[in-house]
Amino acid sequence: MRIMAFDYGTKRVGIAVTDPLQLIATALDTVHAKDVLEYVKAYLEKETVSTFVVGEPRQLDGTESESAQHVRGFIRALRRTFPAVPVDTIDERFTSKMASTSIAQSGITKKKRQDKSLIDRVSAVLILQSYLERRDFQG
């Protein structure tokens, strides 16, 4: 069973998944926010997902960011559409910045580095890796 993570934005959603053993997080795709539930539905027809993980946007001081209400709406939609799959959240405060940094250090061209969908996918991977580390640490 895989774990699926989301870096939710009102325009684009970065998606990452684990391998079936839940050890490795891999970028899956970036989809338009309005298409994400259909995308997940199609994915679940082929793969089993045990948990959804959604990055929670927060300000540096830990309070909710302005996009938090959109993320809460997305979480409600996930729970309503896929009631059998539990939804977990994780603080995603620094993931976009970390994603940009790791992409910059990867040596890919500047044009590709500016591809926002790439940043969204890498952010989703970082959210999922953070979740796996937290789970392993607590377990």
Image (cartoon, rainbow, N blue to C red):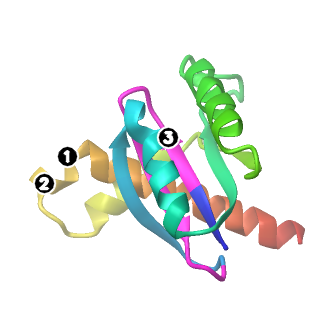
> Which amino acid type is shown beneath numbered disc 1?
Gln
Q: Secondary structure at mark 2?
A: helix
Q: Position of residue 104 (x, y in %)?
A: 27, 59
Which is nearer the eye, 44 or 64?
44
Residues under labels 3 and 2: Cα distance? 31 Å
Decide: is 70 above or below 125. Answer: above
Residue furthest right in the image: 139
Pointer 2: what residue? 110
Relative vertical location of residue 15 with respect to residue 91 in this rendering, above or below: below
| Secondary structure state at the residue bearing disc 1 | loop
Q: What is the span of residues highlighted in magenta in the rendered image?
A: 5-21
User: Counting residues from the N terminus, which is met first, the one under dot 3 or under dot 1?
Assistant: 3
Judged left or right of residue 33, residue 79 is: right
Left or right of 66 on screen, residue 139? right
Residue at the (63%, 80%) spot, across then down: 23
Q: Position of residue 4 (x, y in %)?
A: 58, 59
Name the outermost residue toward the front: 45
Give the CA separation, mark 1 to mark 2: 6 Å
Q: Is residue 134 magenta?
A: no
Please determine whether, in this image, residue 62 is positioned above or below residue 94: above
Position of residue 71 measured from the top left corner of the image (x, y, whole percent)? 59, 29
Q: Is residue 114 left or right of residue 131?
A: left
* Disc 2 residue type (three-letter): Lys
Type of secondary structure dominating the magenta stretch: strand
Q: Which residue is mark 1?
A: 114
Specify the quadrant that holds the C terminus.
Answer: bottom right
Please give the name of the residue rendered at 76% of the width and 51% of the height, measured from the top-left corner. Answer: 84
Q: Do callouts 1 and 2 mark residues in contact (Cβ within 8 Å)?
A: yes
Residue corresponding to mark 3: 37
How many residues crowd mark 1 within 10 Å: few (<14), some (14–19), many (20+)? few
